[in-house]
Image (cartoon, rainbow, N blue to C red):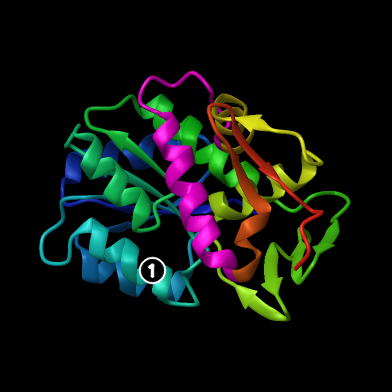
Amino acid sequence: MSATVLIVDDEKDLVDLVRYHLEKDGLKCLEARDGETALQLARERTPDLIVLDLMLPGVDGLEVCRKLRKDPKTASVAVIMLTAKAEEVDRIVGLEMGADDYMVKPFSPRELVARVKAVLRRGLPQDLPSVQQVGTLLVDEGKHQVSIAGKVVDLTVKEFDLLCRLMKANGRVLNREQIMETVWGYANAVDIESRTVDVHIRRLREKLGEEQKRVVTVKGVGYRFDAEIDS
């Protein structure tokens, strides 16, 4: 079954362009021209991914992203944010609100398709689902679910992938370039910065609560997962 992408932008020409390229690659598309419509469609149709413009009439992209992450029905839907603003602060705020990735306008439609497919690919179930438990932390890849002390934790697609990648490194340190390549699927994209990884690490730690201590920063190198720390 084809994945469904919700395109949210008030510029008709841009929506038509993005839709054309996504459908050309076999993806199904939904459209919304404002934030309220986007939220309603997201709740009703639960798309696999949302391409979300930052500047929208009424409810802007940041607020839409925040509401998506607060709603259990849409909390795990992947979000790629589009912005005409190149300043780092805008991109970082978008990531902190829960976006999995961002692109700065104008962008290459082919690059957007590549990023959409990379995010969707990471969300596919594995042939041999694995369940890992460390302390009170339980990660079920088959169900794409994380729980702590029996309570389910809502992670975004990228947060889940990031946690799994760190755990599978078996204690080895991963630098930012390795994480971007394996989690985001592209290590050399010009506008993907190490700051992206840092923001996702911080958000992941916040959601892991008492188990956040297992995500260890190795200064000047990168991050590793410590399974040996006592809970």
x and y percentages locating residue 123 in the rendered image: 63, 51
Compared with 57, 29 (above or below) is above
Does the magenta segment cover residue 202? yes
Image quarter hosting the N terminus = bottom right
Bounds of the magenta segment:
184-209
Q: Residue at x 82, y 41 (%)?
A: 170
Which residue is label 1 attached to?
68
Occupied quadrant, residue 122: top right
Q: Quadrant of residue 66?
A: bottom left
| Residue 154 falls inside the magenta stretch | no
In the picture provided, is 62 more to the left or to the right than 49? left
Residue depicted at x 55% and y 36%? 184
Name the main secondary structure of what is drawn in magenta.
helix
Residue type for callout 1: Leu
- With 27 as the anchor, is 171 left or right in this view? right
Q: Position of residue 212 (x, y in %)?
A: 60, 60
User: In the rendering, at what x and y percent does residue 166 appear?
Assistant: 69, 44
64 over 176 or under it: above or below: below
On the question of residue 23 being in view, the answer is: no
Q: Closer to the camera, 120 or 11? A: 120
- Secondary structure beneath dot 1 equals helix
Q: Residue at x 23, y 71 (%)?
A: 36
Against 223, residue 111 (above or below) is above
Q: Quadrant of the C terminus?
A: bottom right
- Residue at 11% across, 66% down: 58
